[in-house]
Amino acid sequence: MKPNFLLIALLLTLLQGCSQNSEMRIRKQVTAIAEKYIMGQLTDSKKTVLKDGTIVFSTELKKYMIDPAKIFTGLIDDDQNIDAIVTLPTYDKQFQTVSEQLVILKADNEFKLAASFESDMRIISLKDRIITADVPEHSRSTPLFDCPSCWEVVKFQYRMGELVKAQ
């Protein structure tokens, strides 16, 4: 019995390691696409990597950030390929502005930027083609924007190039 248990434990450890390597590879590819997108938005930006892994692209007037914790992978479109959604917090000088959500889909064995949406939503999860997010009930220009209880959880799906509320 013991040899079988050890063999199973070894196989599970190997599978977990392969899964983590695959996830890391996906995150690296998705991050590269997000970086390319940002470089297309900014001219002569400076790239800085913070201790927590956050990547900052900045000019004197504008700043974009890629926070590894804000990269969600899973199924988004109708195929069986793992896709991703990345939140890019943006700043004009030192003030945060509307964030961007990048929808990155895998097709023909490579990841491609499918859409970019400006939204203050905060992605909570991506599971079974459902993007769950906190969405502010008030616009950024009102004093109630930062009210902690003035956010609602909304489920979205990506359909025909748009994020739509899930039924």
Image (cartoon, rainbow, N blue to C red):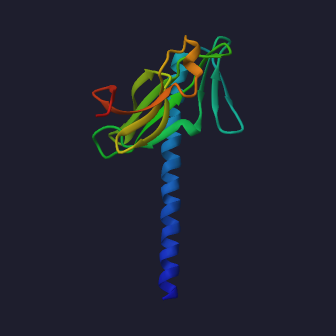
Residue furthest to the right in view is: 51
Number of marks = 0
Residue 7 in percent (x, y) is at: 49, 79
146 w.r.t. 50: above or below: above
Residue 45 in percent (x, y) is at: 63, 18
Please give the name of the residue rendered at 58% of the width and 28% of the height, measured from the top-left corner: 148
Using the image as rendered, state which of residue 95 and residue 22 is in the foreground: 95
* The C terminus sits in image quarter: top left
User: Does 110 sit left or right of 5 as displayed?
Assistant: left
Give the quarter of the image for residue 42.
top right
User: Does 64 sit left or right of 77 as displayed?
Assistant: right
User: Does 33 sit left or right of 129 as displayed?
Assistant: right
Residue 47 in percent (x, y) is at: 65, 26
Residue furthest to the front in view is: 149
Residue 97 in percent (x, y) is at: 57, 16
User: Does 25 sit left or right of 143 as displayed?
Assistant: left
Please give the name of the residue rendered at 33% of the width and 32% of the height, measured from the top-left corner: 158
Please give the name of the residue rendered at 32% of the width and 33% of the height, measured from the top-left corner: 166
Please give the name of the residue rendered at 48% of the width and 71% of the height, measured from the top-left corner: 11
5 w.r.t. 46: above or below: below
